[in-house]
Image (cartoon, helix red, strand yellow):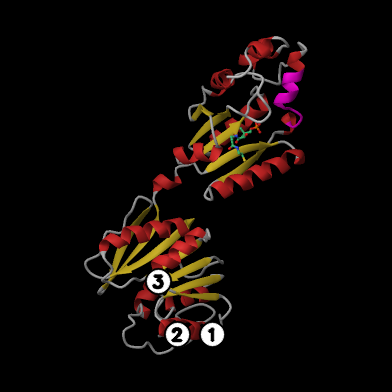
Amino acid sequence: MRIIAGSARGVRLVPVPSGVRPTSDRVREAVFNTLGQFFDGGEVLDLYAGTGALGIEALSRGFDGATFVEKNGQAARMVRENLARAGFPEKGEVLRGDVAEVLERLVIEERKFHLIFADPPYKIPPREIGGLLERLAALLTPDGRVVFESGDPTPVLTTESLKGASRRYGGTVVTFLERSEEHTMKLAICPGSFDPITVGHLDVIRRAASIYDHVVVAVGKNVKKGPKVSVEERARLIEKVAGPLENVSVEIIDGLLVEFARERGARVVVKGLRAGSDFESEFQQAQLNRRLYPEFETVFIMAAAEHSFLSSSAVREIASYGGDVRGLVPEEILDTVRRLYVDGQAAASDRG
Ligand code: PNS
């Protein structure tokens, strides 16, 4: 067996001991013809590694690092020897152990891989394959791929999170899997106190709606600052101005943002950033939210320059003295904001 292409092209791997069923050079070549010939970095996971030929081929073709999982001690030593022969001793990590247990640990460590090879024993019970694929889906980057080798008959290899297409090479069936559409539906949450919504908020909501399939504007009920107006009233004002946007809906959050997002299957939160001064608290919230929900990403949209001075607290203050907030809040809600936030009135509709 040899490395077929890339920086280690032509390197001979150690002779395969009996009992190990390596992916033949022909199948390995066909796999890379489908995946692409060369790569610009990324991490690869080679499960049931055997000789390690697939992972080492990926390193030779441009991947940055490879993690090999192999239960058999002799085979694990062979992977290390092959890594050394190919000149990648420090790019490969060999984890000796049971694949199910190692995968569990990698999921907990939140590891992500761009390419995963799985070449399990052909006699693996079909009922174990679903669980294995779900774990692989959790370890895969959004645009990552799984290459699954199996014998005949081909087990069912499509799950809720992964979909695939199979090709046959003699007695070997190779299935290429990627994330299914449901998991790439772009739903974003735009949370805030919106006390009240300003033209700056509306601009960020509109821009988020032009990027994502659907945006849920989530109005915090028990926000720290102690809102001046009830959550229902704040949500009604947003409905009035953002409701006409086709792919925007308004909801109330009465708990943690991450729980709200998880229940709706949303993995993106969009926040507006006006200046560096916003960054510190937003950064902290983003870090905490990601700790609570590791797949959750915070995306920032920069406020338009003409809104960089604008804040709900400034609107509240001006309105409380009966000042003019025209141009600061959307025209459709101008009268309601004046009435709700002018001193004396706000107290009457305080708390929800
Ligand atoms: O407009 P704001 O005041 O910056 O919005 C704050 C909001 C509503 C986004 C934040 O308070 C929030 O996410 N509240 C829900 C409760 C929660 O998840 N708290 C932990 C945030 S790290």
Q: Which residues are magenta?
A: 308-317
Residue indicated by mark 2: 78
Q: How many marks?
A: 3
CA separation in Å, label 2 and label 3: 17 Å
**Along the horizontal axis of the image, is 318 left or right of 181?**
right
Q: Residue at x 49, y 86 (%)?
A: 81
- Identify which residue, 123 or 64, lies in the foreground: 123
- The image quarter in which residue 208 lies: top right
At label 2, the amino acid type is Met
Instruction: Check residue 190 for magenta coloring.
Output: no
Q: Secondary structure at mark 2?
A: helix
- Identify which residue, 3 or 257, lies in the foreground: 257
Callout in the foreground (2, 1): 2
**Any part of residue 67 in sight:** yes
Q: Residue 313: percent from the left, percent from the top?
A: 73, 24
Q: Earlier in the sequence, mark 2 or mark 1?
A: 2
Q: Secondary structure at mark 1?
A: helix
Residue 84, numbered circle: 1
Q: Earlier in the sequence, mark 1 or mark 3?
A: 1
Which class describes the residues within 10 Å of circle 2: few (<14), some (14-19), or many (20+)? many
Residue indicated by mark 3: 98
At label 1, the amino acid type is Ala
**Any part of residue 324 in sight:** no
- Asked if marks 1 and 3 touch (Cβ < 8 Å), the reply is no
